[in-house]
Image: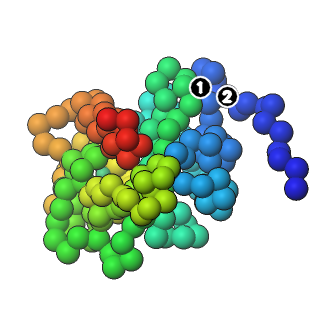
Amino acid sequence: MQEQGSGTSATGAAGVPTLTDDVVRRALRNCSKGEASRLTVPAWVRDVDVATAPVVGWRDPKAPERGVLLVPGAGGAAPCGLVLRAPTGGGARAAAMCDLCRTTRAAGEVALFAAPRAGAAGRRGDTVGAYACADLACARCVEVERGTHALRPDPGRSVEERREALAERAGAFVDSVLGER
Ligand SMILES: [Zn+2]
């Protein structure tokens, strides 16, 4: 089978790359090309404004044990992302805090994800764990102005601060998985 030509680069209004399926698959650093190609990219991902989104995350609708976390590149750079494995037994049994967006969410809504390390370590089965929103919707959680009992954003911080802190923590997590920090 012939590889699809990649001469066309989809860009948004400001020259920022659109998260097409191709861009997403190329961004994933801790899985094989085969796994990346089997991944389902939900339609809404294409409409994400990568210039402002701190992270883009989702659970694979066709393989719920798989999650994806993308960190958009600064200044129009290509995004960098990870495939995550979710536990099959559901999330935490009590309210818990997401390591990435620091939102405290109801029982079952925060899960311990495992990110396979890149390269040889990953092939040996090494992973890095993180408690994160089970739906990986951290980018939406930080936008919540007024928390509820089931979803309490990081207290004492503005939406803007939460967004920045999320991008920073997610970037650090990606780097730790890739062994760059
Ligand atoms: Zn979160």
**Mark on residue 95?**
none
- Using the image, determine if residue 22 lies above or below residue 65: above
Whole-percent x, y for residue 138 in the image: 34, 49
Viewer-nearest residue: 100 or 42 = 100
Q: Is mark 1 within 8 Å of ligand 1?
A: no
Q: Is residue 18 above or below residue 146?
A: above
Q: Secondary structure at mark 1?
A: loop
Q: Nearer the viewer, residue 143 or 71?
A: 71
| 85 relative to 146 in the view: left or right | right
Name the spot of residue 41 as percent of width and height, x first: 60, 55
The local crowd at label 2, few if under 14, some if 14 to 19, many if 20 or more residues have their Cα within 10 Å, is few
Q: Name the amino acid type tagged 2.
A: Thr
| Quadrant assignment for the C terminus | top left
CA separation in Å, label 2 and label 1: 5 Å
Q: Nearer the viewer, residue 4 or 127?
A: 127
Q: Is residue 121 visible?
A: yes
Q: Is there any visible trace of residue 170 in the rendered image?
A: no
Q: Give the total number of marks visible in the rendering.
A: 2
- Is residue 16 shown left or right of residue 105? right
Q: Which residue type does callout 1 highlight? A: Val
Q: Does 111 appear above or below 130?
A: below
What residue appears at the point 17 percent right and 66 percent down from the top-left corner? 95
Q: Residue at x 83, y 45 (%)?
A: 4
Residue 16: give x, y in percent of width and height. Answer: 59, 25
Question: Of all residues shown, which one is farthest toward the bottom?
Answer: 89
Residue that numbered label 2 is attached to: 11
In the drawing, does residue 133 fall left or right of residue 34?
Answer: left
Label 2, secondary structure: give it. loop
Task: Return the residue at label 1.
Answer: 16
